[in-house]
Image (cartoon, rainbow, N blue to C red):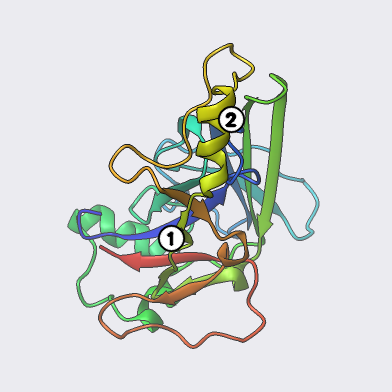
Amino acid sequence: EDGYPVIEFRMMNDRANHEGSEIWDAQISAIVQLHKEQTGSSAGALKNDKVSGGGSTLDLEKKVYYPISLTPNTHPHFSRIWYARHVLNEESPLLKREVRDMIAADKKWDPDFNSWREIRDCLNPFISLRVTLSGTSAVSASTVFAEHVYEFDDVCVGWRFANMVYEKKVGIYNRSWWRRFGRPFGLTGEPVQAEGDEDNPDMKTKVDRALLHDIVPQPGGDFEPMEDDTDSVFHIFNI
C-alpha cells in the first residue's frame, strides 16, 4: 500500500454457508503487547502515542500495549469472508523504533528492505497480538463476539491467503419444490432468495471452511520457509 508492506488478517463467518446468517454492523479491533523499550529518551515514541495498561515502577520486565489500525475495521454485512490489513508505516508499533525513524525521515519505505529476511528483521518481536470482532447476529438479533490471539511466530512473511471460495451446483429439488409449493419466507417476512446468483441461477457460492488458514507464496518467489504445523497465521506482503 503506497509501497509499504502490509499485514493481512482473514476472518470467516462460521455460518458462511447458511442463508440469513450474516453479522450486521461488524467491527474489528486489535491491540499488541510489547516489551517496553528500556530508554530514557522519548525520541522513539510512536506518533500520537496511545499506550494503555500503565507501566510498573518496579525494575521487572515491563510491558506496554498499543492499538493496531486495521482497514477496513467495519463491515455492515459480514456474510462470508472479511480481509483486513495493517500498513507497516512510521506509525506502526509492529516495526522496530529505528525502522519507524527511518521511514519518518525518508517519508517512504526503503526499497532495499524488500526481501523476506529484511522485512522480518524490521518487525518488532511482540509478545501477543489480540484481534477481536463483534457485531449483531441476523439469526438471533443478539450481540456476537470472537477473538484470536497471535504470537510473533505466527507471522508469515511473503505469503498470502489461499482462495477458499468455490461454486456449487444448486440441487434441482429446491427449485422444483418452490415451483410446486411456493417460495418460503424468512424471519423478516421477505421471500427467501433462490440459491445462486442472477447470472447463473444453477450455481451457489460456498466457502470451504477447512481452508481458513491455508496460504500460498506471494508472486515474485520471495517468501520465508514455513513449518508444516502452521495452523494459526496472518500474513505480510508487499503490494
Q: Is residue 50 visible?
A: no
Q: Which residue is mark 1?
A: 97
Determine the residue positioned at 46% across, 36% down. 73
Determine the residue positioned at 50% across, 37% down. 175
Foreground residue, 81 or 146? Answer: 81
Foreground residue, 37 or 146? Answer: 146
Relative side of 105 to 87, left or right: left
Q: Position of residue 12 (x, y in %)?
A: 57, 49
Furthest-front residue in this view: 180
Q: Is residue 94 visible?
A: yes
Task: State the image quarter where residue 100 is shown.
Answer: bottom left
Relative side of 14 to 116, left or right: right
Q: Which mark is residue 153?
A: none
Q: Secondary structure at mark 2?
A: loop
| Quadrant in which the C terminus appears | bottom left
Q: Secondary structure at mark 1?
A: helix
Task: State the image quarter where residue 8 is shown.
Answer: bottom left
* Comes first in the chain, label 1 or label 2: 2
Q: Position of residue 233 (x, y in %)?
A: 58, 66
Q: CA distance from mark 1 to mark 2?
A: 46 Å
Q: Residues within 10 Å of mark 1 (few under 14, many from 20)?
A: some
Amino acid marked by disc 1: Arg
Seen in the picture, residue 9 relative to 145 is either above or below; the reply is: below
Foreground residue, 138 or 40? Answer: 138
Q: Which residue is mark 2?
A: 20
Q: Position of residue 19 (x, y in %)?
A: 58, 35
Comparing labels 1 and 2, the label whose residue is closer to the camera: 2
Task: State the image quarter where residue 16 is shown.
Answer: top right
Q: Residues within 10 Å of mark 2 (few under 14, many from 20)?
A: some
Amino acid marked by disc 2: Gly
